[in-house]
Every structure is written in C-alpha cells, then in structure tokens.
Image (tube, helix red, strand yellow):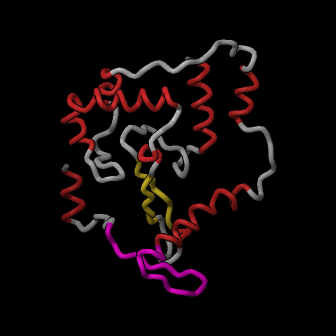
C-alpha cells in the first residue's frame, strides 16, 4: 500500500490503458485492432523464429522421462477435488495479483469462497471425469509490457498472460523459466503421484 502511494505521488505509475502506437514495415499503426493484431503476430512468431536456429536434441523433460520409464508401472488416476482443496489452494494465491482475465479481484473470490467452493469443485471434477476443460479455463488475456527502447517496436515488449485465477504458475516468457520447465514439472508431479 505504501509503495502504491509513493509511486502514484512520484508519477512512477504504469498506465495499462495507455494508447499504443507501433511502426510496422515503416507504417504507423494506431487503431486498437491493428495494434492488437501486430502484437498477436509478433508474440505468436517468437517460438518459431527462436527455435528455427536450434539444433534438435532431447529435452530435459524427455531425458527425465527416459530415466524413469522403468519405475513407472503404476496406473495413474485423478482423484476428485474436494471443497477443502479449493479453499486451501485459493489461500496460496498472492493477493497482490488482484485480477483475473475478466477483472474479477482475487480478494472478492476469497471473500465468497465458502459459497462458491462446492460449485467450483463440481465443475473441476466434471472436467476431470469427462476429460474436457471449459474454454473459459483455457483463455488468457495477453498484455504487452514495455521493456526498454522504442515504444513503437513490438520487440521491445514482452507478453504478460493474465489467466483464470486457479492457474498458479506460468512458464513461457518468464525470467528463468521456459515451457520445458512446465514439462519437467508435469513429469515430476506424475512420477511423485
């Protein structure tokens, strides 16, 4: 709270609603739709352009799986999530990260969790039982966060993914993490189950 006041008073506040202008192929883009499309193209092309020059080799996740393939002779089955699981996991979410992709504050969710936990448990269990996850649970809102350099160049921004509040960890575009880390964590969790 104190830092919010200090930042606001010193003018050190990021405006998430700022108008963005980009220059793409010597053309100035100002419309919200074109700017959003330009960022979408740029962020979507990053993995392909980054991996194009890499030499294919076994990933850490593949190596981990191969090292433990003999140990995994147990059938795996998801267990149902109960109301206490929902409540306990919600307590782990950092309140500083206040909103999900629809703008619903985690503080609001925490204040009504006793009421909505049974419904959330039913939804999550039905998803697991049916093997189908709601499209709303797969959505993300991508926000371009300026790093440094020219604000007209999309390569000077990094994508921040605002997700459904139950997702605890992000891997891509996070310093020190990659999507390989997501695979490694998944395999480790399966092996430890």
Assign the C terminus to one quadrant of the image: top right
Residue at image point 58% right, 30% down: 186
174 to 152, vertically: above or below: above
Of residues 37 and 93, the one nearer the viewer is 37
Of residues 146 and 114, the one nearer the viewer is 114
Q: How far across and how far down the image is residue 73, in percent? A: 69, 13
Residue closest to the far front: 130
Query: Which segment did they paint magenta?
Result: 17-35
Q: Residue 29 vs residue 180: left or right?
A: left
28 to 186, vertically: above or below: below
98 to 169, vertically: above or below: below
* Quadrant position of residue 117: top left
Residue at image point 36% right, 42% down: 165
* Quadrant position of residue 96: top left
How many numbered circles does the render carry?
0
Q: Residue 41 vs residue 145: left or right?
A: right
Q: How far across and how far down the image is residue 134, in percent? A: 44, 42
Q: Residue 146 vs residue 45: left or right?
A: left
Q: Residue 40 vs residue 140: left or right?
A: right
Of residues 137 and 32, the one nearer the viewer is 137
Q: How far across and how far down the image is residue 81, in percent? A: 40, 22
Residue at image point 58% right, 67% down: 42
Residue at image point 19% right, 49% down: 1
Q: How far across and how far down the image is residue 5, in percent? A: 18, 57
Based on the picture, tell me whether residue 130 belongs to the magenta stretch: no
Based on the picture, tell me whether residue 25 belongs to the magenta stretch: yes
């Amino acid at each position: 709270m104190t830092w919010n006041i200090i930042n606001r008073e010193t003018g050190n506040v990021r405006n998430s609603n700022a108008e963005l202008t980009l220059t793409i192929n010597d053309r100035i883009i100002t419309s919200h739709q074109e700017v959003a499309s330009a960022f979408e193209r740029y962020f979507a092309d990053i993995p392909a352009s980054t991996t194009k020059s890499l030499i294919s080799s076994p990933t850490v996740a593949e190596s981990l799986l191969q090292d433990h393939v003999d140990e995994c002779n147990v059938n795996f089955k998801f267990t149902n999530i109960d109301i206490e699981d929902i409540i306990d996991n919600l307590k782990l979410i950092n309140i500083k990260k206040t909103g999900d992709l629809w703008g619903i504050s985690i503080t609001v969710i925490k204040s009504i969790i006793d009421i909505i936990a049974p419904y959330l448990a039913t939804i999550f269990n039905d998803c697991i039982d049916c093997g189908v996850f709601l499209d709303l649970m797969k959505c993300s809102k991508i926000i371009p966060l300026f790093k440094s350099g020219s604000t007209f160049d999309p390569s000077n921004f990094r994508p921040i993914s605002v997700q459904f509040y139950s997702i605890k960890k992000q891997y891509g575009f996070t310093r020190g993490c990659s999507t390989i880390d997501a695979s490694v964590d998944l395999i480790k969790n399966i092996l430890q189950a």
